[in-house]
Amino acid sequence: MQIAEEQLGAVLVIAPSGRLDSGTAKAFEDAVMKHFAAAGPATVIDLADLGYVSSAGLRVLLMAAKRAKVQNRKLALCGLSSSIREVFEMSGFTKLFDIVPARAEAVAKLG
């Protein structure tokens, strides 16, 4: 898994690529949670290049959502493929996150 980070104005974009599973969840958790260690910018997690997400990956995203809520920070997800969206729908995660189709839309919405 690769994890790209980009600051776009007032919004931080975190973009994992590859598989988000039990073997990569810890690296992703470390990358995401370092930004939630203190107050910071609105955050978009762009899942466009993610091919697979397991329950371990969903747990990291849930942790990020909880931390964002506690810190009153804006968080959105974007770029969900049909297979990733299906996992989110089956697990009820579509109700927990602000999900936007594309990165530009998500950045504009949070920025």
Image (cartoon, rainbow, N blue to C red):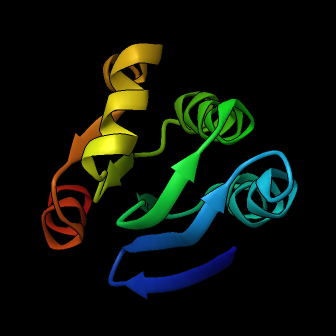
Q: Quadrant of residue 66?
A: top right
Is residue 62 left or right of 8 when viewed as pictured? right
Task: Name the residue: 18% across, 64% down.
Answer: 102
Question: 23 above or below 97?
Answer: below
Q: Position of residue 50 (x, y in %)?
A: 48, 63
Up-down: is 12 above or below 64? Answer: below
Instruction: Indicate the position of residue 34 as horizontal and vertical percent values.
Output: 78, 63
Of residues 32 and 90, which is closer to you in this image? 90
**Quadrant of image for the N terminus:** bottom right
Residue appearing at x 39%, y 46% in the figure? 74
Count up the numbered dots.
Answer: 0
Instruction: Give left or right: position of 111 versus 93.
Output: left
Where is residue 44 shown, x and y percent of the image? 40, 60
- Observer-nearest of 66 and 71: 66
Residue at point 75%, 36% (across, down): 56
**In this image, 70 relative to 100: left or right?**
right
Q: Which corner quadrant holds the C terminus?
A: bottom left
- Rendered view: 20 above or below 73: below
